[in-house]
Amino acid sequence: MRPAASNPATLEHARAMMERQLQQMKRLVDDLMDVSRISRNKLELRKEFAELATVVNRATETSRPLIEAAEQELLVSLPDEPVLIDGDPVRLAQACSNLLNNASKYSEKGGRIWFQAEQTGDEIVVTVRDAGIGIPADKLPSIFDIFMQVDRSLERSQGGLGIGLTLVRQLVQMHGW
């Protein structure tokens, strides 16, 4: 940044890049800490009744910068009627956000991501779909395993460690779902 001190545009570009990288590093460390806490039974859920829409809004708010940076379109579909869920709204939003982040990372620039939650009887079924590269059938059984990454090629590298989907599974299992 010192050589760019006399060039405000270059300086701003470098600052913005550093800020994005710092935020990504913070998310990675937070996710690693959460996986560690869960594996040692040190993470406690703070369950309460919360509206599904509130949880989804928090998740999309968290994921929106990544989605917007990739110029992607996010389409969200929720039940028409308010739905109360009994769970930890912060951790459920984290799980939904991790699903959205994963969809964004493996979708093309300008792609589309669909988040759908629908009530089926007493259950809420959440589906995240994207027009990304897809998951080979032989990798599906292990996609939620820690450090699992289907495509490790340089052009698909997004700085992830393969813990986001593991954390989703663990958080959902902690809720007894």
Image: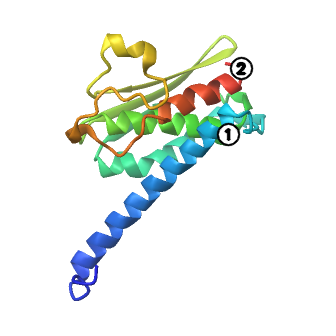
User: Quick check: 143 above or below 161?
Assistant: above
- Quadrant into which the C terminus falls: top right
| Residue at 49% across, 24% down | 145
- Give left or right: position of 171 versus 73: right
- Where residue 146 appears, x then y in whole percent? 49, 29
Q: Nearer the viewer, mark 1 or mark 2?
A: 1
The CA distance from mark 1 to mark 2 is 17 Å
Q: Which mark is residue 176?
A: 2
Viewer-proximal residue among 42 and 125: 42
Colour scheme of the picture: rainbow
| Residue at 43% across, 48% down | 64
Q: Which mark is residue 37?
A: 1
Does residue 78 appear in this view? no
| Residue at 61% across, 27% down | 170
| Residue at 32% across, 44% down | 158
- Give left or right: position of 64 versus 73: right
Give the amino acid type for the residue marked by disc 2 in the picture. Gly
User: Quick check: 18 above or below 110?
Assistant: below
